[in-house]
Amino acid sequence: MDDTDSPLHNIFHLLSSAGYVNAATPDTPPSHKITDAISWCIAAINSSVITESIEEGLRSVGCPHTLRSSHVRDLDTEAIFPVIQWLVQRVSSSQEFRHNEVSYFDQTFGEGEHKPQQFKEVEKTEISIKMLRGNLDELNQRKMNVVKQLDHLRERINKEGADSGVQKLIYLMTSFKKLKRQESHFQSNCDSKHIELQAEISELERKIENGWDSESLSDGLHCSFSDLLERLDWTKKQLAAKLRDIVALRRQIDDLPCQSEIIQYEHRLSELYAQIQGKHQQTHKYYATYNALLEIKEFMLKEASLLNSIISQFQEAFGSPDSRAKLVHSMEGIVKGSQQKLEKVQLAFREEEKNLTDFKDKYAAAAGQHKRLYSFLKAFQVECAKNEKLECKVESENC
């Protein structure tokens, strides 16, 4: 399949169309680019949002889709694409709104030279208030649509029964509550913005009544506007730096192994240690067998040489009494040497028995230690399982 038709390519194409310049960077991993792009979109939609996770940032801008850090890390395009699509639409809307405001500002200050500068500022402020009221009316209209859908659903439930529409009712009730929260939040923002704009109108009217020069008033407004833009840019830079630090820290946290991975590593190392120990014992047994057989071979060779020597001397011993005495003396030397070798073998045997006893004692102590460590390991695994269940429960409650 061509790369241009892949879901990741579609996601990066959407981000590029929204103005995210790092979407086509080849050296950055896709998961890191998606994380940075989501942070950039959140900052572009609402520059006052400062969060430490993707979930909180998406909730703060009102994203209706659910996305977790694990989805981005695993490149789950089915979960990522709707979130990116929604964010790009919001960014485009925000950019269009800002472009309209700038256009209106340019038209207000560039056209209509026949009006005094003070009245232009008052008209601009009043139009901003009207735009806020229009947004509030739109939100109220959405609320009324949801209420109408609820009423229609109640009628269908009464006619067809509760089982056929209960899922849709739950969804609409959730949407209705979410819209009410958004309405309350938006209403409070509108009220605060309205108070600020009314204060600005009063200040402009006071300046008009006091006879301020239109040119000086325009210069003052330009200076204030420039200061606000500088503060906005500085805040965006601080937010971007903070988000980069958060993303870098989160990457470091993701690189650390979790508790389950540590337990898997421990089990694997234990298995490898057991295999190495078994192979070592087997090799040691082979060496011991080889040494024992080599020693038996030496004894058998010496025995054959001794027998050959006795046979050759026995034939000569019948010739004279001196030869018989020499044979007896030689046999006594052989018996004495054999006795010494027997004593050495018995001494080595006793040492081996002593070493065997010591090894048995060490084995018994090691077996007792193994039982205690096994009981500690089982208790530790039980506690780890409890902690994992508790973390899953807390995560599900947060979601």
Image: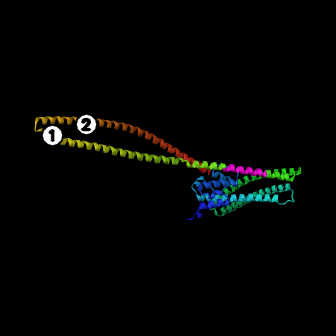
Residue 181 percent across, percent down from the top left: 70, 53
- The image's colour scheme reads rainbow
For residue 16: magenta? Answer: no
Instruction: Check disc 1: other Cα within 10 Å, few if <14, some if 14-19, many if 20+.
Output: some
Residue designated by label 2: 341
Nearest-to-viewer mark from 2 and 1: 1
Q: Nearer the viewer, residue 91 or 339?
A: 339
Residue 240 percent across, percent down from the top left: 67, 51
Q: Nearer the viewer, residue 24 or 175?
A: 24
Q: Which mark is residue 313?
A: 1
Please state the extent of the stretch shown in magenta in the rendering: 224-240
The tag earlier along the polypeptide, 2 or 1, is 1
Residue type for callout 1: Gln
Q: Is residue 336 left or right of residue 51?
A: left
C-alpha distance separating marks 2 and 1: 23 Å
Q: Nearer the viewer, residue 174 or 376?
A: 376
Name which residue lies at 25% across and 42% down: 299
Magenta segment, prevailing SS (helix, strand or loop): helix
Q: Quadrant of residue 359?
A: top left
Q: Secondary structure at mark 1?
A: helix
Residue 381 percent across, percent down from the top left: 50, 45
